[in-house]
Amino acid sequence: AALPNGNNIKFSKLFGGKSDLDFAGARARPSASRRGFLDTCTAAIAGMATSAILSPTNKALADESSSSLVPKVLVLGGTGMVGKEVVRQLREKNINVVATSRNGRDGTAALDFTEVGGDIDATISRLSEGCTAIISCVGSIGTDMDGLVNSGSGKVAQSALPSSVKKFVYISVAPEVREASKGVSFLKDYMEGKTYSEAAIQSAFGSSGRSYTLIKPTFIYGGDEFKVSPPRVATGYGKLVEGLLSTGVFRAAAGVLPGIIGIALEPPVNVEAVAGAAVSAALGSNNVGNVLDTHDEIVDASGV
């Protein structure tokens, strides 16, 4: 018997391996013979259907359709401590990622807020093409360019309005840190840049089917080394301090002591938790609000 696509089935294989069709036997056992014939034909047709479904053309179409449904996220500052962790977590979830850095290192796209100037609209239009969300991990402290760099995320939010981006997530700074830093000259530009970006993001993504999440930790720890500029505390020590300051006695003290003393007693946040909260917000988790400004809110949103 001949089947489509050149799949030939010999009668000898249909009837228990007999070399020739035994018509007499077939008449004597019509039910078994017909059942065997139908079962074999069904298996052959199913095999051909599977082959057709998995053909290179159909597989390519399926892959293309699947790829178009996967979210795509633009990560600003993708090579810093928080940015690298955000990129890692997104890729772990098989999310398409476009990451930027100041000089385009490590396979990222170059985006330098100190040089982009009037070209920022065109640059962001190109980088955000097809993206559903932007996560900004950009931050600069202790340089002559702090104001310009830290206000860059707000300018990106405004430039992204014509794009497909519906969600903007920004790693900012806790309000109590901002309050305590008043009068500290070397933090002035840093705080003004962050404040500008927050306001611009809220204005651009606060309506018209768009949304935002501002993540405001007091201090972020992570990595395997200590640094002074930018301030860094290694993971092992940071976890120890976080656990200690998360106890009831220190929580109570942080709530009543003023200024920098109270802030120093607030538990720091692991970089994995900050990144996890940012990723959850970017991917549309219902557990993430517009503002996460305490240790517990950030950790809860991260799922870490």
Image (cartoon, grey):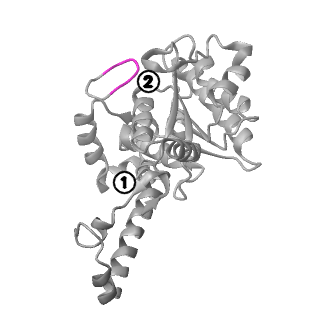
| Residue shown at the point (72%, 15%) measured from the top left | 119
Query: x, y (%) of residue 195?
Result: 63, 32
How crowded pointer 1 is (Cα within 10 Å; few <14, some 14-19, many 20+) is rated as some
How crowded pointer 2 is (Cα within 10 Å; few <14, some 14-19, many 20+) is rated as many
Q: Is residue 9 left or right of residue 197?
A: left
Q: Give the vertical position of 257 relative to 225 (above or below).
A: below
The numbered dot on residue 144 is: none
| Residue shown at the point (44%, 60%) measured from the top left | 2
Q: Give the residue type at disc 1.
A: Ala
Q: Is residue 149 left or right of residue 29?
A: right
Query: x, y (%) of residue 15?
Result: 28, 73
- Does the residue at mark 2 contact the one at mark 1 (Cβ under 8 Å)? no
Q: Give the residue type at disc 2.
A: Thr
Residue to which mark 2 is pinned:
79
Helix, strand or loop for disc 1: helix
The numbered dot on residue 252 is: 1
Alpha-carbon distance for marks 2 and 1? 36 Å
In front here: 125 or 101?
Answer: 125
Helix, strand or loop for disc 2: loop
Which quadrant would residue 183 be assigned to in this image?
A: top right
- Magenta residues, start to end: 227-232
In front here: 121 or 187?
Answer: 121
| Residue shown at the point (48%, 46%) measured from the top left | 55
Query: x, y (%) of residue 160?
Result: 70, 32
| Res 21 visible | yes
| Res 219 visible | no
Residue 53 magenta-highlighted: no
Which quadrant would residue 270 be assigned to in this image?
A: top left
Q: Main secondary structure of the magenta part?
A: loop
Q: Nearer the viewer, mark 2 or mark 1?
A: 2
| Residue shown at the point (49%, 49%) measured from the top left | 280
The quadrant of the rendering that contains the N terminus is: bottom left
